[in-house]
Image (tube, helix red, strand yellow):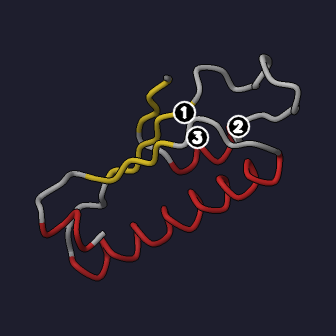
Amino acid sequence: MEVARNLGFDGMDLDWEFPENPKQMLNLSILFNEWQEAIKAEAKATHCAPLLLTAAVYFSVDFFLSDVKRSYPVQSFNRNLDWINAM
């Protein structure tokens, strides 16, 4: 966040198009929850507008072309992301 502020960025983007299993999907959800909490705390402490949080993800919620069944944590995306880029 400090780097984003120092360089005048509007936010941060995570590009994780292929989490490999359900555990990584859970970790992605936890990451976005914690990241959004940190963004809110940083904005409050600095009296700046909150940084945007975006993600580049696989084009489908479900990885239907894979042998390992897994789905993106859509509820976490809805709560925590400002924008999603489907790849």
Instruction: Report the amino acid beneath label 1.
Output: Val
Mark 2 Cα within 10 Å, few/some/many (few <14, many 20+)? many
In the depicted view, which residue is nearer to us: 32 or 56?
56
69 w.r.t. 54: above or below: above
x%, y% of residue 51? 30, 58
Instruction: Report the residue marked by disc 2.
Output: 72
Q: Residue at x 65, y 53 (%)?
A: 28
- Which numbered mark, 1 or 3, is in the foreground of this view? 1
Mark 3 Cα within 10 Å, few/some/many (few <14, many 20+)? few
**Left or right: where does residue 57 sit relative to residue 48?**
right
- In space, the residues marked 1 and 3 are separated at their CA atoms by 14 Å
Instruction: Report the amino acid beneath label 2.
Output: Tyr
**Left or right: where does residue 21 sit relative to residue 52?**
right
- In space, the residues marked 3 and 2 are separated at their CA atoms by 11 Å
Could you say whether the residue bearing mark 3 is in a helix, strand or loop? helix
Q: Do the residues under discs 2 and 1 have CB atoms within 8 angstroms? A: yes
x%, y% of residue 44? 31, 76
Mark 1 Cα within 10 Å, few/some/many (few <14, many 20+)? some
50 w.r.t. 13: above or below: below
Could you say whether the residue bearing mark 1 is in a helix, strand or loop? strand
x%, y% of residue 34? 56, 68
> Which tag, 1 or 3, sits closer to the chain's start?
1
Instruction: Report the residue marked by disc 3.
Output: 78
Instruction: Report the residue marked by disc 1.
Output: 57
